[in-house]
Image (cartoon, grey):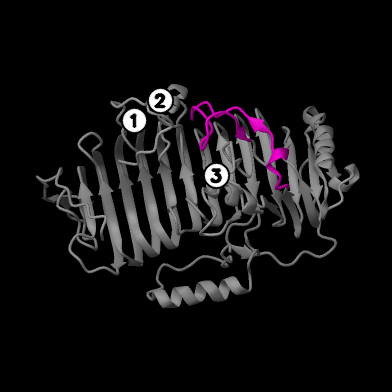
Amino acid sequence: MAESLPVGGFPAFLSSHKTLFIVLWISAFGSVFLWQRDIVGAGFSVFGKAGPGRSMSGSRPFEFNITDFGGVGDGVTDDTAAFERAISAISKLGKRGGGQLNVPPGKWLTAPFNLTSHMTLFLAEDAEILGIQDEKRWPLMPPLPSYGYGREHRGPRYGSLIHGQNLKDVVITGHNGSINGQGQSWWTKYRQKLLNHTRGPLVQIMWSNDIVISNITLRDSPFWTFHPYDCKNVTVRNVTILAPVFGAPNTDGIDPDSCEDVVIEDCYICVGDDAIAIKSGWDQYGIVYGRPSRNILIRNLIVRSMVSAGVSIGSEMSGGVSNVTVENVTVWSSRRAVRIKTAVGRGGYVRHITYRNLTFDDAQVGIVIKTDYNEHPDMDFDKNAFPILENISFTGIHGQGVRVPVRIHGSEEIPVRNVTFRDMNVGITYKKKHIFQCAFVQGRVIGTIFPAPCENLDIYDEEERPVKLSTAQNVTEIDYGV
């Protein structure tokens, strides 16, 4: 069962886990899908219920209603042809500014369809696009070039419910309408090994520029939820993403993959895998494709992942990941809060990563860097392709109810270099010695932090003057039993 949606932000100064938990659920009870921010507003707000006269007008010079093309919206009738006809009409208007397709309240059952450039897909309140569950209606596509083959099976992969390639200027927005992949049947068949191809995402945009997704709910994807692939200038704002926290395998929330200039802000994500996972290709295929993910800003989020992590980088990062800022993020009731994961064979790099103003509440592990995530597309990966991990900073890290606040597991082949901790105070639930765990790490702590850092790190005072320099950077104090 998908988790309910809490309203608004959560003050970092809440000192009691029990208090925070009660606030979460009281808020969630009365406001499951109402937590959104107006697209032009500056802060969080709650949408009032839209009356019958609420306008769906946008900035496009032409507007259409899905019913104009034969759409029924009863949750039973197949509306695929209506979407295809509507988008075909909009595709002819690109030189005149494009068009907006309005989807009014109703349940709009459809097989996968393709978007076009200069298009706005607008979902009214109580409008829900439903993905047809028969996988025979989902087209097969070539494997992603930076992955070598479909992520779960060799050969073709299923396409996404809403798809686009080589597009420019695409907006998916609304009054918190929803796109529902009805992923339950896909998850069951995946577990029973009844699928012969990799499952498809809910929304996938490839090789495109100027993409905006805002003010909608995405839920129950068969696989990754929103997957922008090799895109530039992508914005995700005021989006709710939901899937069951257990039993919904690989339902990542947002996976920017070989993308540049990305903003993800003001979202609530509670899913069955990573809430966000930044990627850039897998082993030798990602190295050859050579498209990094860079210039990514993630801010003002509330996320939960009982299976994986709130915000991840990797493990598919062979094209490189750089210039990422993660700030003002609350991770609650999760297995891990933030994680970087890689392995021998990945190559590439993760560098210039900034985490600041993070709150962990009830996380098994707070900060994770893992260099032995040994999952490969095949055995032809380069055993000498060692990723570079460097220039990673953590500032303003707070929380409570965390079992292991830090676990940085570098190795002789993949050391972690130039890591900085500053202003950290994380309440712990496990009172053993080794809860700030390190191996093959070089970096520094500025000022006083809690819990006490591992001996691998240099100690500086608040004015950044050296106090104690480490001579034990290769010491290993990793304990997965904690």
Image-based side of 20 in relation to 123, left or right: left
Q: Which amino acid does label 2 sit on?
A: Gln
Please say whether residue 145 is one of the residues in the magenta stretch: yes
Could you say which quadrant of the image residue 363 lies in?
bottom left
For the magenta stretch, what is the residue range? 132-158
Whole-Å distance between the Cαs marked 1 and 3? 28 Å
Residue 219 shows in this picture:
no
User: What residue is shown at x 34% (from left), y 63% (from top)?
Assistant: 398
Disc 2 residue crowd, few under 14, some 14–19, many 20+, Cα 10 Å:
many
> Which residue is disc 2 drawn over?
284
Disc 1 residue crowd, few under 14, some 14–19, many 20+, Cα 10 Å:
many
Whole-Å distance between the Cαs marked 3 and 2? 27 Å
Q: Which of marks 1 and 2 is nearer the N terminus?
A: 2
Residue 403 shows in this picture:
yes
Q: Are marks 1 and 2 in contact (CB under 8 Å)?
A: yes
Q: Are marks 1 and 3 in contact (CB under 8 Å)?
A: no
> Which residue is disc 3 drawn over?
193
Q: What element carries label 1?
A: loop
